[in-house]
Amino acid sequence: MKIVRCHNGWMIATAAALSALAYPVTCAAAEDGRFQKLSVYLERNVQDHDAEIRFEATGAEEGLAALKVLAPGERTVIDLRTPDSKLGIRSLTLESPEPSDDGIVRADFPAGAYRFEGTTTKGASLRGETRLSHAFPEPAAFEYPRPDQKDIPATALTLRWSVPKGSEACVIVIEQTGTPYEVRALLPGSARSFTVPEGFLRAGKAYKFAIGTVAKDGNRSFIEAGFTTARAR
């Protein structure tokens, strides 16, 4: 999703502003209890009609020297190694390209059980399994600001939206266009508003914002729009 890229890791720092923290909620315990987190989920942008798949794995205290993920039918879709590292990699987030046809993603990554197999730098074996669904949640709807609305106040701005029943969580992303500054938050599915931290918005600037609904299986549907803050007087 275009607005939701450069975002592997949900901890976001903003300049001279409070940070919003959010973490993916799709987790599955490993069969032997050694993987601390496993997830695989789909993410789509409703307006752009594109989609991607994301894999996340967190191992034990020691790093991973190897990680393999097998899709339904025993097809290997990930095979990573760190042969010359003594520490290895403890946590990984991997995502596919974003074709405009989400059918391409679903064809390459079928629904069903995905098996994770890891080897730590100390030689311990990790195994776990989690499931991928192809069902996307219904998207949210903007209430305020409206898409492309201008002269939005740069202070005390509260975003508002509506979401369908049954959403597990909402992801909020706000970017200042043309800069690395952004705010992200992961909110409960019952949330209908979010107040932007004071100091983040600047007068007379363009911003993009996205709202993502998160299903219980972790799949996400994003809508995105832009707004412009009022000039200083």
Image (cartoon, rainbow, N blue to C red):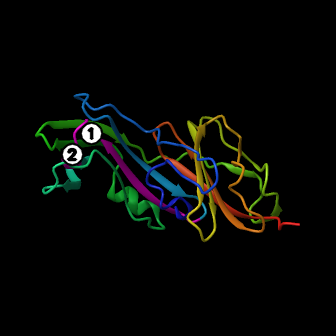
184 relative to 35 in the view: left or right: right
Residue contact at pointers 2 and 1, CB within 8 angstroms: yes
Q: Earlier in the sequence, mark 2 or mark 1?
A: 1
In the rendered image, residue 214, in percent from the top left (x then y), is placed at 54, 43
Vertically, is 33 above or below 140?
above
Element at label 2: strand
Of residues 80 and 90, which is closer to you in this image?
90
SS for dot 1 = loop
Q: Residue furthest front?
A: 16
In the depicted view, which residue is nearer to us: 84 or 127?
84
Which quarter of the figure has residue 162?
top right
Q: Position of residue 12 (x, y in %)?
A: 53, 51
Residue 59: mark: 1
Q: Is residue 157 left or right of residue 89?
A: right
Residue matched to label 2: 64
For the stretch drawn in magenta, the main secondary structure is: strand
Magenta-colored stretch includes residue 142: no
The quarter holding residue 116 reads top left
Pick out the residue farthest to the left: 123
Q: Give the residue drawn at x 71%, y 40%.
A: 192
Residue 67 forms part of the magenta stretch = yes
Residue at the (17%, 55%) spot, across then down: 82
Looking at the picture, does residue 133 appear above or below residue 96? above
